Amino acid sequence: MALLPFENLMQVFEGSIISRAEKELEEGWTLSPYTTLKLTCPINWRLDNSSLRTFNYYIHCWEMLNLILLAYSTTKEIRFLTPAIDIALDWISHHSGTNKKPNLSPFAWYDMAVGFRTHRLAYIIDAAIDGGIISYDIQKILWQALDEHRLYLADENNIVFRNNHGFFQIAGQLTMGKRFKDKSPLMGQAYKQATQRLTTILDTQFTKEGIHCEHSPGYHLMVYKTLKALIDFSLIEDSKIIEQALCIERSLSWFVLPDRHIANFGDTDYQSLAQDGVEALKNWSTVEMQYAVSNGTVGKLPSYDHIIFSEGGYAVVRKASLEYPHKFKYSSYLAQIAAFHSRVHKQADDLSFIWSDRGSNILVDSGRYGYIGRTEIGSDLFNQGFWYSDPKRIYVESTRAHNTLEFNGNSYQRKKRKPYGSAIRRWMYNENGIIAIESEVKHFRTVHHVRVLIFMPAQWLIVFDWFNDAVKNPHTARQWFHLAPELYMVQEEEGYSVSVPSSKEPLRIVHLLDGITSSCVYLANDKDILQGWYSPKEKVLIPNYAFCYETQQTSNGCIASLFNFSSSLTNNLSWSRANKSGNKARFCWEDEKGIHKLHFSREKSKDLAILYSIETPIG
């Protein structure tokens, strides 16, 4: 039987695979921002300190072998396979069977690492035997190690069905089982077990809308790319799973920003998905995703310009620019996260949102930074839901690092808090092109919080927050906002002004209700607290502007902020008001276009309603 190709589970797009693999053989494998690892033995498999957790995890996945195995699968040149065999034997000599050394890295038999390593070890064995380049004794050593992985994955107690780790364990079991099922009855059983498990894990990981339940589009992307690879390599032939995968990709397309990066909610890096038309057609299955990643070169967007994932807990508005209707990068884009499905990758970001408009990112999420340090069990941080102790990781997880409402300087609880699923309650779209989204949560057991986002794409955005403490405890509430790092802002008497490179008009920001105070502008603050920082990737923080509006020591209150593209802006605080229940409000502001008046009502027995008018200046 012909050697099956190495399954490109991580969807490394071809193009430069051979030259990149040659470079890695010569110079070593690099995982930014860590030091380069030479692909020669012996390998340092130990976890030397907690700051290297991510790096150590990847080497136990054998991630450094991925490119050279792809290169061998393409060329059948032994120079790409022999280093992989040597590294596999080196790992086995320390971690497998009777060879297990004391003080092993915690990632040696870490659930997800086992899944990836199984996939790569299975191919190494198959390719080495097919190429006739290893002795029977070496075959035996490698096969015994693979069988140890088979036994580990066969045990239900080792499979993590509650998060994405279980999916990658099953993917490794599936590739191993498919490769050897005709040569070994035990491998046939592994293949059958993995196939049965796959349906269960996908239904656990994704909603019926195709939304991944780990609060991070980056993990949605990661799982989907592997799922698509399993389908592309004929490891999955079930028509229901294939249709489910298409739904998952269409949903993912809504999280592609106009600049073709993925929306960085939760534990998501600012990752580019940009491809040309040829690459997009080759690498994606749906016209929606093809259009988004290719900047509209190929594919097609849906006819509707907003979507509510009412089970998944996201709302997304994406409206083509009137000035540049066929240029995806100039689209107006607003996305809100209002989800809490489990503690997995859940940051303290309830009801936060991001915004891009007029060709620029405007408001951004904080990013991931990295999984660095472990909090002590029973500590205050641990009880708040922080799993990692690095101060920069704590910051990006914290409530104050997101575009949401913070109470008394505390982050929202995640541990010992019942997940609410989706917090999106109602939404509406009117004839003026305004969309409003209402979301609702409870914080700290007694604080009821409602947010209404009212959006006129490419023109203005109102962020309205109402809160009430059932036991009348007073709170200082801060409505935080975080600008994209490429933007520049200044504080003015009336509010704030932001220079947006791709906009003819600046973005002006004012509060709309009396009794609200404005904060100073934060940029790269690291004295009393971290504030004004953004993490685009692993172990990187860069400065960005942050500010907040605040109301102090009240058990019931409202904060309303206006973001308006205009050359001048004045808020009419004497006319604007909101009732105590937060069910009705009216706002007035004036710019060069005229006097804007907006009423909204969110009474429980009625639909969410918006009335908006603009009185243009005479003459």
Image (cartoon, grey):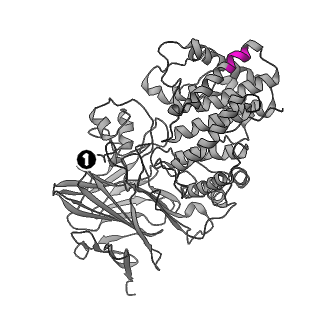
The image shows residue 214 at horizontal and vertical percentages of 47, 47
Relative horizontal placement of residue 163, taking residue 121 as reference (left or right) = left
The image shows residue 395 at horizontal and vertical percentages of 35, 41
Q: Residue at x 55, y 63 (%)?
A: 330
Q: Residue at x 66, y 37 (%)?
A: 174
Q: Amino acid at mark 1?
A: Gly
- Name which quarter of the figure residue 43 lies in: top right
Residue in front for this viewpoint, 488 or 38:
38
- Name which quarter of the figure residue 448 lies in: bottom left
View extreme (right): residue: 1
Relative horizontal placement of residue 488, taking residue 116 as reference (left or right) = left
Residue in front for this viewpoint, 470 or 511:
470
The image shows residue 128 at horizontal and vertical percentages of 77, 23
Which quarter of the image is occupied by the N terminus?
A: top right
Q: Which residues are magenta?
A: 138-143
Please, is residue 496 above or below residue 91 in the view?
Answer: below
Please, is residue 341 above or below residue 602 in the view?
Answer: above
Q: Residue under circle 1? A: 409
- Name which quarter of the figure residue 581 lies in: bottom left
The image shows residue 366 at horizontal and vertical percentages of 42, 46
Relative horizontal placement of residue 614, taking residue 553 as reference (left or right) = right
Residue 30: say if magenta.
no
- Element type at marker 1? loop
